[in-house]
Image: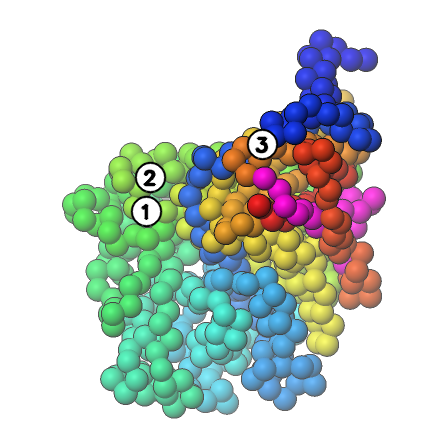
Amino acid sequence: MVNRRKFLHYGALGASALIVSPKRGWAIRPNSRPTDSRIEVLFDEPLGTISPNVYGHFAENLGGVLYDGIWVGEKSPVPNVDGLRKTLIEHMRKIKAPVIRYPGGCFADSYDWRDGIGPSEKRPRRTNFWADEETEKAPANHRYDPNAVGTNEFVHFCKLIGAEPYLAANVRSLPASAFYQWVEYCNSPAGSTTLAEARAAAGFTEPFHVKYWGVGNESWGCGGEFTPQEYAVEFRRYSTWLPKYNDSLSLIASGPNTDDWNWTREFLAEVLRKGPRELHRIYGMALHHYAWNLSRGKTQDWVTGKGDALKFDSVDWYELLREGERMEGLITGHWQVLGEFDHDHRVKLVVDEWGPWYRPGSEATPGDLLEQMPTLRDAVFSGMTLDIFNRHPEKIAMANCAQLINCLNSLYLAHEDKFVVTPVGRVFELYASHQGGLALRTIFSAPNSHYERDGTPASFWGLRGAASVRNKNLTITAVNPSTTESRLAELTLRGGTVKEASMTFLTNSDIHAHNTFEQPDVVVPQTKALSVEAGVLVVEFPPATVAALNIQLN
Ligand code: AHR
């Protein structure tokens, strides 16, 4: 049944089967199945440049991320570059990985960087922060850190990829001197200090020029259980003096968990008690948000509230997207709180952990802690999240998907000689061309997706995305979250004309579709040329799709 609202909506959009070409006049668009959606790109409403670092990554010494995922060892039969998994390096180059955060996460606040330098065979073995969570199935090096990977190996990994390292310093269990000496180890000029010589002895004469430094991690929790005021005092102390060596250091303060507005407010209030210049110490405020609660409001319990990565119905599909969609409000909300203290908005948001978090049970490699199998649902989730970041370029300086490999929202899964790109990794391929682009305000109009949530009619939006332009290339990414309905959208460029267009998209008739070591090509991008018919570009987005339109402009 078509109600009045629907009639008006379809009536209006259906008429767009008629031409809207000021140059050519009115005409009938061929194959005119009425469009139900519209995408309007407004070239004269730029939003800002999308920082490439929004497409950043996170690699914690946790489960199979480092040992097995990234590091296989120099003597391994697995193809490697100085012990680092070669296939991973190649894939990360392909997506132009801009920045990688390391060594944690919670691990960071129990890590002593001094254990990870010097000859590998002399490095100590330490109990990993995550040891107690590990099961018997996990290899020993997940529980007892051999320190085979340290600063040298990690920075080398970044340089091989062309990414910037982002190091998280230990605020909970090391003194401030360990932090400034880590900076000294990384950045002091060749031959200048004892630590520069130690670096050179490992084969790295030239400084690493590490720019991004986290001052602790989740200091409200595993990073020390601080109150925001207590952490602000620590932040001031740890950031009071750090050697710069002509590099500018960008310090990232441990920020709020999800919607903890109080953390942001109280932290800033305390930092500023010493005066307004204190703000200059802070480059970014870290925000973490995981979509984990699929209980549909029944519980807030961290264990029982979680859903399954593979066994889910369409309600769970939308529920995950709902949880992920909160990101937009978190960004605007924390931005508003920042603005109460920082009127010029010098301090940006750094969303250095984001992604879905499911209960255990779907690991590609049994025994890998916090590993889960990303499906098409996670691809749609990730596309939606990246588009949220793309729509707020002036607010987001960096974001880091949690995590890179073998953990949570992995782009890649690997075990020994096996390697696969997950649907999430495919999304990063699709979205790479947004990096450094000028974001343009873009209006998506589409009917909602409707479903039943525990016996009650529920709805979710029907089509959303983001656009950016660089030179004559326009990238529009979009997500159709509906599990059942395709969207037929008419594209209008207000201020540009199309020369050539194609669409690369990810979808599958099964919403659970995923890539495994045995079947790596279940969710892979498909590309099709888009034709401009009588001045109108009409694009079909199949159900459960993440898409990138690559448009060459005249
Ligand atoms: O990404 C896994 C963990 O989640 C990180 O170590 C921690 O920062 C967060 O709670």
State how far apart marks 2 and 3 are (Cα): 31 Å
Tell whether position 507 is magenta.
yes
Q: Nearer the viewer, mark 3 or mark 1?
A: 3
Which residue is the site of mark 2?
338
Percent from the top left, x then y, of residue 454? 74, 26
Tell me the residue at 42%/34% (across/down): 333
Tell me the residue at 54%/33% (across/down): 494
Is the CB of mark 3 within 8 Å of ligand 1?
A: no
Type of amino acid at the residue the image marks with label 1: Val
Quadrant holding the C terminus:
top right
Type of amino acid at the residue the image marks with label 2: Leu
The residue range painted magenta reads 497-515
Q: Residue 465, located in which quarter of the rendered image?
A: top right
Comes first in the chain, label 3 or label 1: 3
Query: Under tag 2, what secondary structure?
Result: helix
Tell me the residue at 70%/47% (across/down): 503
Type of amino acid at the residue the image marks with label 3: Glu
Residue 76, relative to residue 240: is it above or below? Answer: below
Q: Is residue 551 left or right of residue 269?
A: right
For this rendering, which residue is in front, 359 or 259?
Answer: 259
Tell whether position 549 is magenta.
no
* Residue 40 numbered mark, or none: 3
Is any part of residue 264 visible from this angle?
yes
Percent from the top left, x then y, of residue 359? 67, 50
Which residue is the site of mark 1?
347
Q: Residue 75, located in which quarter of the rendered image?
A: bottom right
Query: Under tag 1, what secondary structure?
Result: loop
Q: Residue 229, located in which quarter of the rendered image?
A: top left
